[in-house]
Image (spheres, coloured by chain):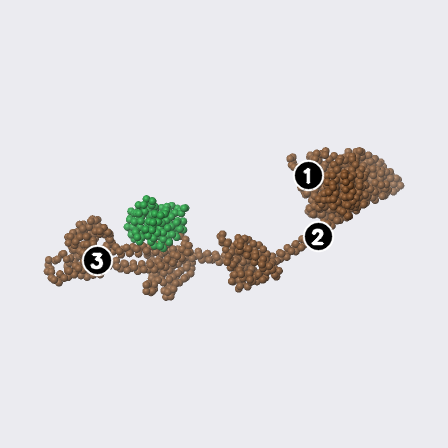
Chain colours: A green, B brown
Amino acid sequence: MKQRILVVEDEESLIMLVTIILTAQGYEVVGARDGGTALRELAGGRFDLVLLDVMLPDMDGFEICRKIREEPVTSQLPVIMLTARKSRGDQSEGRQAGADAFITKPFKGAAVVEAMRALIGLNQ
Amino acid sequence: MQRVDFHPSQLTMLIFYCGSLFVMLWIGIRMGQKGRGRRLPSPRTDPALARDPQLAIAPPMEISPQITLTNQLDDERRFLRSLLDAIPDIVFIKDVNGVYLGCNTAFATQYVGRPQEEIIGLTDLELVPDQELALNFRKQDLEVIAAGRSIMNDELIPLPDGRQIWVETVKSPYRDRDNRVIGIIGVSRNVTERRELERELDNSRRNLQTILDNLPMLAWLKDGEGRYQFVNQSFVEAVGKQLSEIIGQTDMELWSHDLATSYRDDDWEVMANLKRKHIRERVHAGRGGIWVETFKSVITDDQGSVIGTVGISLDITDRKQAEENMMNILSLQTATLESTADGILVVDCNGRWSTYNQKFLDLWHIPRMDAADGDDRLLQSHGLPQLVDPEAFLENGNELYCQPEAISLDTVAFKDGRVYERYSQPQRVGMTIVGRVWSFRDITQRIGAERELITSSKAAESASRFKSVFLANMSHEIRTPLNAVIGLGYLLLQTELTAQQRDYLGKVDQSARSLLGVINAILDVSRIEAGELLLEEIDFRLMESLKRVMTIVEIQATEKGLDLQLVINGDIPELIRGDSFRLEQVLINLLGNAVKFTNRGLVVLSVDRLDLRGDPQVMLTFTVRDSGIGLSSEQVAGLFRPFSQADASTTRRYGGSGLGLSICKRIVELMNGEITVESVPKQGSTFTVTAQFGYAAQMAESEPDAELPAFHWNQRVRLLVVEDNQINLMIMQEILTRSGILVSSATNGREAVEAVSGGGEARFDAILMDIQMPEMDGYEATRLIRRQWSAEELPIIAMTAHALSEEVQNCLDAGMNDHLAKPVDVEKLYSRLRRWLKVEGESSPEPAAAPHPGGALPVLSGNRPETAALRLNSSLYNFREVIALLRRTHGDDAAMVRRQLAAGDADSALYVIQTVRGIAATIAARSLGEAAAAVESAIKSGDMERAGGLLPAVESSLAAVFQGGDGVAERRG
């Protein structure tokens, strides 16, 4: 079965890019453009990993991450956060919120794939 | 490092997105520039602090005791106070110890949450609950005091309501008249909202950068002066410099002069024309050159004025290579298509021509101009009128439209006489059928050749049929009179004749039999050619066959003074199953040849058994070895071909039809064996025959009388002989009557039917039926007779003239039991009668007079014994009769020679003694032969006295022959 990735990112073109990259690697990608959508997706389906942008229109990524950790079903779900290099505080706040890894924008597709493989192994 | 391959459609989408992102980017850059300008205000330019410090350092609560307040001053203070309270920023003043000297309302209400009066006189440590934060504020104050200049800080501070806000605080030294720093003045502004905007903008830029960095193309943005404002990661990698070394630079600093100039010219052109530019070029980059495809376009601001250029550039080296490969493939395809002699057309599923070659256009007479349309209907409208059968052409084509998977093959005939073979198969891309490939091959010549071949083959067939019929007829026409000659000759020999008459009659008999032999050989060859030579499967005694063969050949061998030997090696079964007649034919032929071509020495026939215990078949090897003239390898090569002898001179010297060995070869092959020859010229030849036989179906005792040619039937046998030829009829009657058989005759089929339809018991035990007869032939007669009598009740044996398998089959089909070839062999006739009448024949009561088991030696009074072929049908004669005949005709030959020698008639004496020697060879009487040869030799040498002295030996040998003591009898004794 393909591993399912939830990409939470308000910039649609970025979702598209990540989808292209990850689909080429054999992952199945679901995009969510805001926190509410993301949480609904997580409640409604099985995911193997969440790629989470910090800045979202309705709530920030840290809050979503905390909610993921609080929910028993998703408490162990690997989360990679996309942060801006500028805000060093993001990473410490993200760690407190329970994120597993961080990718700084701008990033190369290979970095995402590498981080994902480190967390959930090779896709079969 | 992961490489991401983009699908072309994805790439297109991304490029589309890039366009919109570039606009965002541009706006972002301009916003960023504006933001920077706003974020870094020069303290000097701040009107509230710098322009009139006097105002700023006069907090309302702190009134200098030296100054008398006037109304005017009061007004100013009120104004100042109102002013400070009116501005949304917070303003505060502290002394060098950090004690608040004053603040505006905003500071008191929003940031501290206490009245102004309570704030004055307190420090941050007392005002701010977070002591760490308070200490940090104090640290900032001290930095300002120490530095003596303004310092700006961005900081996150908590509000009394619990919220946190970002503020931008500028702290400046507060100085007295003497310009000494006596405290700080702070102005803080809530920048939370602005910071949020900045963060969002930053995020957008990073998103954009991320996307552009992941594109497999170079992307950049330049301002109107050609300075790079933005580049993506691919661009950075392509240039090989740091990002910071690229931003703000022009092409001149990045590329070679020529390249930079051309890039700049492109930019100018794009900006001047406001049009997109597409460039394909080869550039030198990294290892060798690469092909790039570049798109350049202008960026305009809100008002439409040009503010810069954007560009993307793709490495299309791979695509270029693919294009080149495609060109190669196309040229290969064209070359291949044009090099074939076939016309080729590929039609897609919509009936459009995908590909065709010139040959195709030529064969349909389609002008190249018309072909460019590439519509399959063109072929139909243009081509159909040229065809002999356009309907069939269309029908076949339509059928294939319904069966796209099918492979078709048919022929297309043109009115001008050309014929094409039309082959088609589906064209597939992967598993999908996308069209159909048609090929047209000109087979006009082949068709012509095939027609000729059919015609000539028919001619050959008919010629061959004609030949068969001719041979059959000939054999009938010749054998019938020959039958008469031989039969009548035989009867004539039974009468009183003078010696001379007997001699002539003997020669007539020889010649007739010789001719019969030749005809039989020719008939055998024609049977072989027609595949009609079939072998019989009859039990026979091998030793008897071998003895018969030896006896026949011995005559010649003796005549030439050769030693003929039979060697049996190993355990040969007594009774085996096969065709003894054909085996004898082969061996007589080989031995006859050996004798014929050997002048000195010996001829040996040896028999070996090859099969192993348990084999279902008996395999025998017959080896005929001679010490004759031998054969060269060239002669061996043609040896077994019909009508060929070793060479023409051989034919002249030794005679013969040249058919014998080819017949032998075929016979041996039918016996699952082979015939081989080894030969050394002048030393001799060895012919080896292998042949397979079955084991006898019966016990050895079951055919006790097969060797005896004559019978005295225990019961009276009644035969009806049906034969239209009066001479043949007479011969049959004569022969049969002599065997004690009651013979009736009928001269055609109708008479035969009448003769047997007497009612009640059958009047005959069997019928001998000729086939070709007037009024009613043998087949018809048999069919009618069979209505009344079964094959069991009344056996009918055919006497067939043609002796072809077909005729034999016809006989059996008509209801006959068996068949005999004409001229009828008496021994075979008796054998068949015994089989069908199921009666036991008995041998002659005088066994001593018939000691020769093979019997059947013709006795000839001539002085030249004839060849082996003559003896084949010799079984007409009974040995006893032979001896009697010999006694009668040559009993006093020795006395005659003596008289002639006495009279000095050497020629006559020589003639007579030669005759005696010939007879001796004929009957294999060795002693007599030697004695006669000695006399002959003496006469020839002129020594009449010695000849006369040798005559008693001849006389005694003759007497021995007459008593069965010499010749065949001596040998078989």
Query: Which residue type does callout 1 highlight?
Result: Phe
Residue at disc 1, secondary structure: strand
Q: Which residue is mark 1?
A: B693
Closer to us: B258 or A75: A75
Q: Position of residue B692 (x, y in %)?
A: 67, 39
Quadrant containing the C terminus of chain B in the rendered view:
top right
Q: Position of residue B604 (x, y in %)?
A: 72, 39
The earlier-in-sequence mark between 2 and 3 is 3
Subunit bearing disc 1? B
Q: Which residue is mark 2?
A: B463
Closer to us: A68 or B555: A68
The earlier-in-sequence mark between 2 and 1 is 2
Q: Is residue A44 above or below residue B226?
A: above
Q: Is residue B840 above or below residue B638?
A: above
How crowded pointer 3 is (Cα within 10 Å; few <14, some 14-19, many 20+) is rated as some
Subunit bearing disc 2? B
Q: Examine the rendering and report whether any part of residue B637 can be seen.
A: yes
Query: Which residue type does callout 3 highlight?
Result: Pro
Q: Which residue is mark 3?
A: B88
